[in-house]
Amino acid sequence: MTLEGRVSIVTGSGSGIGRAIAAGLAADGAQVAVLDLNQAGAEETVELIRAAGGTARAWQVDITDEAGIDRVRDEVESAFGRANVIVNNAGWDEIRPFMDNDRDFIRKVVAINYLGPVTVTQAFLRGMIDAGAGGRVVSIASDAGRVGSTGETVYAGAKGGIIGFTKSLAREMARHQVTVNCVCPGPTDTPLFHQQPEKMREALIRAIPFRRLGQPADIAHAVRFFASDGASFITGQVLSVSGGLTMAG
């Protein structure tokens, strides 16, 4: 797979899955815009990519800040050119029973996991369409959005929204030769996972047929495929990367 000369946007790429995705796309030849709320983490990702011979630059941005997204888009396009690949990876959650979700928590979950990716996609997609050379949009949803998850009801709803957003946008973008797909990780070895209660973590690992957590690289491989020319005739699809935890069609 080669992405030589292409510009890739990866949100939430200062650690975990996003860092693995950014590094993988850079290894495939892309110029990577590393976007994260954590500036230090974004800079670390850039250092790793450059040490491996890749091209990347970090931008600090809150994906719930519409003006901030537009500013970063303008700066990325000035530095690298228009995006060829948009990866919506940034996300956030806490395990809480639904009836313990206060309104501020609900708004935060929806803003980060649904509205943020929608806003980022729209901001960078205009340049992709105007360039007339096609492109890729890949969003990280979750198996919670496919089959539900106790203690993650609002999060599951937001991620289910990303799945619906993906399918609908894929229909609209087909005439522009822009593919739109999403990857649904199962439990993955990330800082966010390790913030969950120990009993919850242990139960999830036992439930996975492979008896191990997913690794960030497992998710990155799927994203790299969707970003590649090998996936040029695949759009509107949802791919679970969960070690068999979910097998729903």
Image: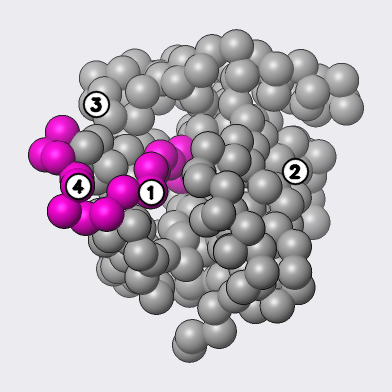
Ranked by sequence position, the earlier of labels 1 and 4 is 1
Q: Residue at x 22, y 37 (%)?
A: 105
Instruction: Answer with left or right where residue 84 lies relative to residue 121.
Output: right
Return the mark for residue 24.
2
Q: Residue furthest bottom?
A: 249
Residue 196 position, x and y percent, is 50, 44
Give the number of the mark in front: 4 or 3: 4
Using the numbered discs, state the Cα–Cα distance from disc 1 to disc 4 in whole angstroms. Answer: 10 Å
Q: Are marks 1 and 4 in contact (CB under 8 Å)?
A: no
Callout 4, which amino acid?
Answer: Asp
Viewer-proximal residue among 125 and 112: 112
Question: Is 36 situated above or below 113?
Answer: above
- Mark 1 residue element: loop
Can residue 222 be seen in the rendering of this structure? no
Residue 149's quadrant in the figure? Answer: bottom left
Task: Give 179 or 149, whichever is nearer the viewer.
Answer: 149
Q: Is residue 86 magenta?
A: yes
Circle number at residue 95: 1
Q: Are marks 1 and 3 in contact (CB under 8 Å)?
A: no
Q: Quadrant of residue 98?
A: bottom left
The residue where tag 4 is placed is 100
From the viewer's perspective, is the residue at label 1 or at label 3 nearer? 1
Name the residue at 66% across, 63% down.
205
Give the mark, 4 or 2, whose residue is nearer the N terminus: 2
Neighbor class of circle 1 (other Cα within 10 Å; few <14, some 14-19, many 20+) is some
Residue furthest front in the image: 199
> Which amino acid type corresponds to the residue marked 2 in the rendered image?
Gly
Question: What numbered label is drawn on residue 66?
Answer: 3
Q: Of the two numbered discs 4 and 3 on the same chain, state the one appearing first in sequence.
A: 3
